[in-house]
Amino acid sequence: MTKKKPVNARSLFFPIMMALTVLLAACSSGNGNEESSPSATTETATPTSSASASPSASETPAAEDGLYSINDFSNVKKNEGEAIKGGSITFGLVSDTPFEGTLNFNFYSGDPDSQVLSWFDEGLLTWDKSYVYTNDGAATYEVSEDGKTFTFTIRDNVNWQDGKPVTAEDWLFAHEVIGNPKYDGPRYDSNFTNIVGMAEYHDGKAKTISGIEVLSEKKLKITYIQSTPSLLTGGVWSYPLAKHIFGVMDVAKISASPEVREKPIGFGPFKVKSIVPGESVVFEKNPDYWRGEPALDEVVLKVINPTTIVQQLETGGVDLVDSFPVDQYPDNATLSNVEFLGTIDRAYTYMGFKLGKWDAEAGKVVPDAKAKMGDVNLRKAMWLAVDNDQVGKKFYHGLRWNATTLIPPSHPEYHDSTNPGVAYDPEMANKILDDAGYKMDGKFRTNPDGSELVINFISMTGGDIAQPLAQYYVQSWQAIGLNVQLEMVEFNSFYDRVGANGEDDPKVDVYQGAWSVGIDVDPSGLYGKDAIYNFPRYESAENDRLLAEGISEKAFDVKVRQDIYKQWQKLMVDEIPVFPTLYRAVLAPVNKRILNYAIGDGTNLYPYQIAVSQDKPFVKE
Amino acid sequence: MDKAPIPISSAKQPTAKQPNKSPSGWKIIWREIVRDKVAFISLIFLCLVILSVFGISLVLDQEQIVSVDLFSLKQPPSEQFWLGTDYGGRDVFGQLIIGTRNSLSIGIIVTVLTGLIGVLVGLVSGYFGGTVDNIFMRFVDFFMILPTLMIVIAFVTAVPKYSIVSFSLIMTAFLWMGIARLIRSKALQEKEMDYVQASRTLGSSNLKIMLVQVLPNLSSIIIVTMTLNLAANIGLESGLSFLGFGFPESTPSLGTLVSYATDPQTLESRWWIWLPASLLILVLMLSINNVGQALKRATDARQRKG
């Protein structure tokens, strides 16, 4: 399934920390920097998402017109100089709050924790540039003819950092803990209920999970109820839990145990040496790492405040950070001691229209035919009225750009680049409104029936640009005669009012939100009729059909699946329950002494390969 | 007891037909300010700022100034934008004028309102004393122990939309106690004076004694406190806006302009956004305080310069 969380309109790094943590599925290691998996078939490290990885790509993309393009960024660090033996690097976790410190993939819920985790632990399976599981990871897999049974084999040299082997038993144990009714983490979801016998186990009707079978010490077989293409893109739970440590504990107490909080364990390239809770972690290398001995001796992770990133980078206080606010980029593009890596973010900003309510008991959306925003002409006019192209250029210097469909280009196989979306055309917007009967009455238009039309628009605070950006949209809508009232709301109460708890605020008509999408393209978690995160509360038969087809067996054929999602993207552009406004770039500045480093998926680089060319970081000249 | 008539030479006695007239309160104040060069310049500066800010803001179009202009983001000062633009493409000079007007208006409204309430409560409480005083002072005590700033912040967050007036009212509700205490203690002293006793003996009503006889004698202290409060209130408003609990960006104030400086880029490389507002706050505060100090001296014969 997908990993998704609401993100703040301005920048990705800040909100994820505060993002509704329940939504973060564990497949998020793909979000981590170096956890990306290689693809056996890709001979070079060309990233999927970033078009230009050519070595000739200029170091600091030139921008005479003040504009930058993500295509000018490489997601792979250029190597300069020879690697020295050992060395220590500092990783900056950009956050203005401490990290929570639930340091186990089976229990963590926030992105900061996953950043910490990805240094010392990893999933058994890795995926390629199109997010499909590969056989290059710590475990290999085989799928049965009918696509329902997976047989996994863990490599012999994969051991926990205390020397004990990672076994099939540990993998089963992770499933048992997550399926246990006393489990207090956010992982038990449709990926688990899709395992044969899991629901019975969860309800206490069965002692074991009938669909999971330990074949030998290193072999595990899992049978799923329904075969879907999503299984191959993040649908398998691939994080084992060390049974020899946690097996003796009460399930409800594992997440608070010292083995999760203070001396966590994994089988990744580095192991935790010491932790200052919420502030910093020191990792030392794990010489027995299964891929090989790591090049670095030590990695220091520390939390740094977003406002001091630039200073820290300039002085070499940190070598690399997990993300960088794009609006600070133009002023720092020429930092002499760092190289900026960039890739397309699996995220988009969008404008949502409230079209109904959430029925908590039935667990599905209830569209309201009389909703204020119910008229597709009105919604279309609002899309036509905003100039996202200019917004991206002016506010984000081209590092966010006009979005066209609801599947972002970070999924190049499914993003329909031939669909132009709806382009800026205020005259057309006026015409559509005139034709639909929204007459001008004084300064603003009325409803076709002559009643007053006041549209309440809410947007998130946070970040410099949030307010002027929201205000720009309001001005654009007022320019076509719509009386839109803006209210700026703080992040958490924003999602409360939009309906993250199912209690929609009836006073909200339009909202500006953002989604970070999972590695699997299936959007039903966001737009399905039974998804609580379907904030517009939109439902249609065609939508249901396409979403179901997208994860049906016939969608195993990539061509068929592409076509289904092409249709779905078109449907969304026609019906406009929400419209995408901007796609985003992720930027990651890296000190020039770092070698063998990349961000994004589908590179051939792993954290154990990271090395440095000199002892001390370069400082700004 | 000596039942002699009220000493007619008392400087505090408002007598119009005094032949050997001692200077009136206003004259003393004026003389004091003119003698003190710094205070005099401050006063002139204050008057200029107030007049120009309120004057210019009459011709400025606030809606146009706070509207976002995509094509002129973050511009340095130029002929079109005297103080450049902010990250929303909004003219900083216009925001500065309107922001100063808003901050000043709030400061003045809050000062006047807190002054009115404080004087009323203090006067009644001090003049009557006893039970009335007790009740009033317990009220004041209650308000005083409240964590004022926190409550103002909570109020501002809870009220989704507020105007200059409602914002001022929220602030007033928690800021009137200091002045009430002060006036009450002065009124307690004053009511023991012989002229009050005499007036009472002659049958004047309490209301008349309070408003016509006691109040004028307290006027100097009221003026001084309110002047100094004005500076404090402008500072409080700017502080709240700076922290993000004041006005939204669509209603500029000095605080919102200064708060742009929390962005390191703006702080380092775009001084024109925050420096003028910061300087203006500094100079305004200094001026008001200078004038206030002069006024304070004027009320105390031992400290006077002239």
Image (cartoon, rainbow, N blue to C red):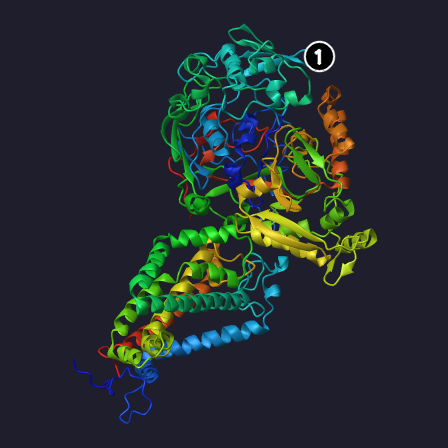
Q: Give the residue number, with chain letter if any, for mark 1.
A: A146
Looking at the picture, tell me which residue is in the foreground, B132 or B221. B132
Residue A330 coordinates in the image, percent (x, y): 54, 50
Residue A214 coordinates in the image, percent (x, y): 55, 7
Q: Residue at x 55, y 28 (%)?
A: A28
Judged left or right of residue A508, residue A100 is left
Q: Residue at x 75, y 20 (%)?
A: A554
Residue A294 coordinates in the image, percent (x, y): 44, 24
Q: Residue at x 44, y 28 (%)?
A: A102
Judged left or right of residue B204, residue A401 is right
Residue A235 in sight in this render: no
Residue A297 coordinates in the image, percent (x, y): 38, 27
Query: Residue placed farthest to the bottom in the image?
Result: B19
Say which element carries label 1: loop
Tag 1: residue type?
Asp
Q: Residue at x 39, y 61 (%)?
A: B175
Query: Residue placed farthest to the right in the image?
Result: A435
Mark 1 surroundings within 10 Å by alpha-carbon count, few (fewer than 14), some (14 through 19), many (20 or more): few
In the rendered view, would you say A441 is above or below A533?
below
